[in-house]
Image: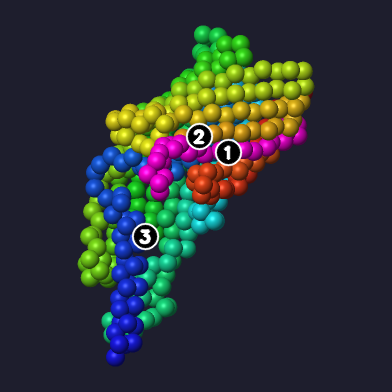
Amino acid sequence: MFIFRIMVWIKKSCAALGASMLCLLLFFESYAQTRKFSNEFLNIGVGARPLAMSGAGVASVGDVTAGYWNPAGLTDIKADLDIAAMHAEYFAGIAQYDYGAIAKTIDSTSVIALSVIRFGVDDIPNTTQLINADGTLNYDNITTFSAVDYGFLLSYAKALKVPGLSLGANVKVVHRMIGDFAKSWGFGLDAGLIYRQGNWRFAAMARDLTSTYNAWNYSLDQETQDVFVATGNELPENGLEITLPRFIFGASYKKEFGKFGVLGEVNAALTTDGQRNVLISADPISVDPVMGVEASYLDMIFLRAGIGNIQKIKTFQGTEEYSVQPNMGVGLRLGNFFLDYAITDIGNTSEALYSNVFSLRFRIFKQTQ
């Protein structure tokens, strides 16, 4: 009898766990409100070069990845087409992160680009229908679904009449899905500028400049709703999710010594969605600095490193100490082909969770007669 009760408890727990996991994904997005980590997948970064430098890229970027980091940097592109792709896996391969982009020069002063970002967790078990009406387990009822975020950025940049000054902007469309249960569409604008003076470059980037709005719509069948209610979970409601603006300021300096070159960049991200655990933590604005360096040889071989995600943490002994996120990487250029690699720490120095990031870039020039 005792074993039978345990088996019944396990059956009910399995259904409750499946419903709770699904409800957590759905409920987290419901109701109209601003969130600190809304559309956070768009803050991960693209391209192994800037990721190896801990995301310090808004000033020195000058290729197709500028469509993400700072669209004003697109005006540095001299090729007719600039194409890039990247793949990364996070959390031991559970989450897949993919990026692709293409930029085309319109004339000597303007460039247009399209960037696509996908962040997804696939094959998530849905156990809400695991238990039949008679209380028996039916593993054939287990299905899988994906939680996927898409970002589409259409960028335009133009070099102005002021020497060294460029402006750029993104029209951003965000599409997020949780299986067939929930979908959202969001829209926003980004804008940036870069000013070049000798070996210096100064930049400012505003993401979600007008705030980005994601409208969520939920479609749960009656059986799933019944499971939610039976397991003590609230039913999610259609709502609006708001992403507040983020401002990033940066400066970079590059110096060449014959065949060698050294570049350094410092960025500071100002968030406006309340106090965060970053180096300068305040409400409503917090400041998160990152720093990166790049050494090159013959503009062909590159070594990169950076630190970011500087936080004050409390130890088990009750003391406070600072933690940092170190990243590093290498790059190789063969003519118009670029291969970059970065190893990034998405945890902290004591419990590091390293991810390998690879990206490719290729430039195409018009053939002259």
Count numbered badges in the picture: 3
Name the quadrant containing residue 241.
top left
Residue 146: give x, y in percent of width and height: 44, 59
Q: Are marks 1 and 2 in contact (CB under 8 Å)?
A: yes
Look at the image and name its color scheme.
rainbow
Residue type pointed to by label 1: Asn
Q: Which mark's residue is nearer the viewer, 3 or 1? A: 1
Q: Is residue 130 left or right of residue 77?
A: left
> Viewer-proximal residue, 114 or 227?
227
Name the quadrant containing residue 138.
bottom left
The quarter in which the N terminus is drawn is: bottom left
Disc 3 from disc 2: Cα separation: 37 Å
Residue at the spot x=44%, y=63% of the render? 124
124 over 79 or under it: above or below: below
Element marked by disc 2: strand
Residue range (magenta): 311-338
Residue type pointed to by label 3: Asp
Residue type pointed to by label 2: Gly
From this viewpoint, which residue is outermost toward the top? 162
Q: Is residue 210 visible?
A: no
Please tell me whether residue 210 belongs to the stretch shown in magenta: no
Q: List the residue tagged with mark 3.
A: 180
- Dot 1 or dot 2: first in sequence order is 2
Residue at the spot x=40%, y=39% of the render? 320
96 over 114 or under it: above or below: below
Q: Is residue 275 visible?
A: yes
Residue 34: give x, y in percent of width and height: 28, 39
Residue at the spot x=40%, y=34% of the render? 278
Q: List the residue tagged with mark 1.
A: 327
Q: Which mark's residue is nearer the viewer, 3 or 2? A: 2
322 over 134 or under it: above or below: above
Disc 3 from disc 1: Cα separation: 37 Å
